[in-house]
Image (cartoon, rainbow, N blue to C red):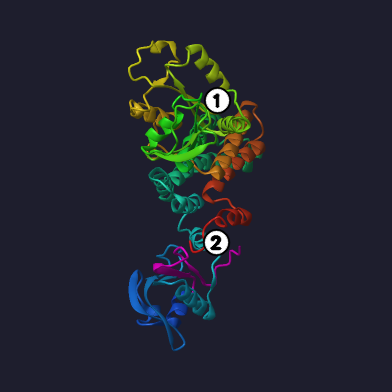
Amino acid sequence: MSFKHNDTIVALSTPPGIGAIGVIRLSGPKALEISNQVFKGNDLTNAASHTLHHGWVRDGEAIIDEVVAGIFVSPKSYTGEHVVELSCHGSPYVQQRIIEVLLKHGARLAEAGEFTLRGFLNGKMDLSQAEAVADLIASTHGTAHELALQQMRGGFSRVIATLREQLLKFAALVNLELDFSEEDVEFADKEALYKLVRELLDEVEKLRASFVVGNVLKNGVATVIAGRPNAGKSTLLNALLNEERAIVSDLAGTTRDTIEEVLNIRGILFRLIDTAGIRDANDAIERLGVERTMEKIRTSALVVYVFDVLEISTEEVAVDLKRLHTEGSTLICVGNKVDGWEGDRSLYPEETVFISAKDKQHLKVLEDVLYKSVTGGATAMDQTIVSNARHLDALNKTAAALIDVLEGLDNNISGELLALDIRNALEYLGEITGEVTNEDLLDFIFSKFCIGK
């Protein structure tokens, strides 16, 4: 991707296909001039910013379509450049004809993410805000939307800016000492620097830890419903979804393969996976189903173990829980079919949730446990939450650099080496917001955007 932006780009900004309207966007120094050459109506080159103009797009004397032109004069636009948005009828043929005539008059086709890239390069947003634009477009539920919107509005950027500002002040003092090293002058208070770096490291660690929640808020969580045959797994799936999605039968081994559906609990998407019952299979097909169950369990972040309180002993529950335990995943124990049951609940694991899936009893309790198990009760607005893997990688490197600073202070290393470690931490923090960047990184980020954004 070329970072030269002395040309004018054009692209369809609405999804391709037939619709009521389509929006064709131009951005660049000649956006007003090129648009005006094909537009019959008001003179767009003299139009005020943030105004709409009705007219016709022509190819020579031939009229292509009736349109409304939205004018955004530099620097008061999304990209910081002159921007024109032509709202035309939603015919793919019409849209293509308009783009072709704009290309003929000097525009070029935009690359993926180039409008947002120009906004970043022109200082309209930082890099983390630009990435949030892509997240906002891709959001499929309320919490992902809320998280992306918070980041796009600069919430995360402000936290990073504060961390960098505090570290920059001490970096300046350390560098000043190096300039006066021959005069044995000390400008930086090493104890104060140690305290500051320790505090910064604590903040970075909080941000790193938040990625677990952020990833769930953004992408949802794979949740396996597992247990022995006839424990009520499919009944539970149907009850949570409030529809008959899985076949329910008294015959053991009815579910031979996994069934996947999505459950939204307070904005968190749980990708529920109903699996074959765990037991010694009687035939090859059922054996394959059990194998797939175990594979799903090994790769899922959350496992809901369902057991029949009427048919299984506490010892068997303990055996199953040990078998299902996987490093890095959360295991929730659910006792099913408790309607009319008067057993001793204290004999089961302390946090066991007791329900009746058939009668939909205590499902709200289970939903609360599911929600808290992956969020800790946090929401996107409770705190600054990291949801971008690139940001997490930069924070990991920042933490390592800050640890090097602390160890350097403990070992009384030279000012040159100390300054280098501080500079590394500043560079990694700067990578998040784009204060430190390179062409390859920008290519990687913006190539994932849709064309027209």
Q: Is residue 73 left or right of residue 424?
A: left
Q: Amino acid at mark 1?
A: Ile
Element class at badge 1: loop
Q: Residue at x 57, y 57 (%)?
A: 447
Q: Residue at x 53, y 20 (%)?
A: 321
Q: Residue at x 42, y 19 (%)?
A: 351
Q: Magenta stretch: residue 83 in it?
A: no
Q: Nearer the viewer, residue 30 or 202?
A: 30
Crowd tier of the residue under label 2, counting other residues whose Cα lies within 10 Å: few below 14, some 14–19, many 20 or above = many
Q: CA distance from mark 2 to mark 1?
A: 47 Å
Quick one: quadrant of the N terminus? bottom right
Instruction: Kindly tell me whether residue 30 is visible in this rendering.
Output: no
Q: Is residue 173 left or right of residue 244?
A: right
Q: In x, y percent, where is residue 58? A: 43, 83
Element class at badge 2: loop
What residue does disc 2 label?
Answer: 112
Crowd tier of the residue under label 1, counting other residues whose Cα lies within 10 Å: few below 14, some 14–19, many 20 or above = many
Q: Residue at x 33, y 27 (%)?
A: 359
- In the rendered image, the residue lying farthest to the bottom is 61
Please give the range of residues in magenta: 1-29
Q: In x, y percent, where is residue 350? A: 43, 15
